[in-house]
Image: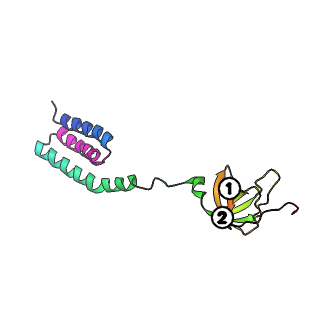
Amino acid sequence: MPAWLPWLIAAGILGLVELHTLTLVLGMLAVAALPAAATAAVGGGPALQVLVFAIAAALALAVVRPVARRHRNSPSGLRTGTAALIGQRAVVVAAIAPSPGGGGHGQVRIGGEVWSARSYADDQHLPVGAAVDVVGIEGATAVVLARDPQPHTIEQGDT
């Protein structure tokens, strides 16, 4: 049996076990077995193979593992795209007035961008400059709710 074959078998077994444990350690050891197999393939003795494996394993565990752990433990609640806008504060730049069909339309500035917007509350009038919270995104329209606990509503007879 060639001297490099046990190293490849060990790398394969360590890789398979890593898939079940997800500790990152066995995966790094599987990768470290590959330079040891290469050393065996070019005729390096058993002591040199073990030394190459030890150096490769130490480098992998000292350099790669901390980076991988940092990425693996990153916040899973990270929101991107339009989902990141929900909960943001916005300012009304074109008044949002109730419409007969409900949920009047206007525009708000979220960060530095102007979005078409509609009120979450069907009877809510939001004047220019009103502070609002983005509670949802429907297509290209932000659904907003006034930050003021007593928003001005249009009463019957008001126009």
Which residue is pictured at 44% across the width and 56% down the height? 75
Residue that badge 2 annotates:
90
Quarter occupied by the N terminus? top left
Distance from the alpha carbon under mark 2 to that under mark 1: 10 Å
Which quadrant of the structure image shows residue 88?
A: bottom right
Position in image of residue 48 (x %, y %):
13, 46
Which residue is pictured at 23% across the width and 43% down the height? 33
27 magenta-colored: yes
Quarter occupied by the C terminus? bottom right
Of pointers 2 and 1, the one earlier in the residue sequence = 2
Range drawn in magenta:
22-42
Residue that badge 1 annotates:
142
Characterize the magenta stretch by its predominant secondary structure. Answer: helix
Q: Are marks 2 and 1 in contact (CB under 8 Å)?
A: yes
Q: Is residue 47 left or right of residue 149?
A: left
Position in image of residue 12 (x %, y %):
26, 36
Position in image of residue 62 (x %, y %):
26, 56
Amino acid type of the residue that numbered disc 2 sits on in the rendered structure: Ala
Of all residues shown, which one is farthest toward the bottom? 129
User: What element does badge 2 sit on?
Assistant: strand
**In the foreground, 152 or 79:** 152
Identify whether 135 is placed above or below 13.
below
**In the foreground, 95 or 38:** 95
Position in image of residue 113 (x %, y %):
66, 62
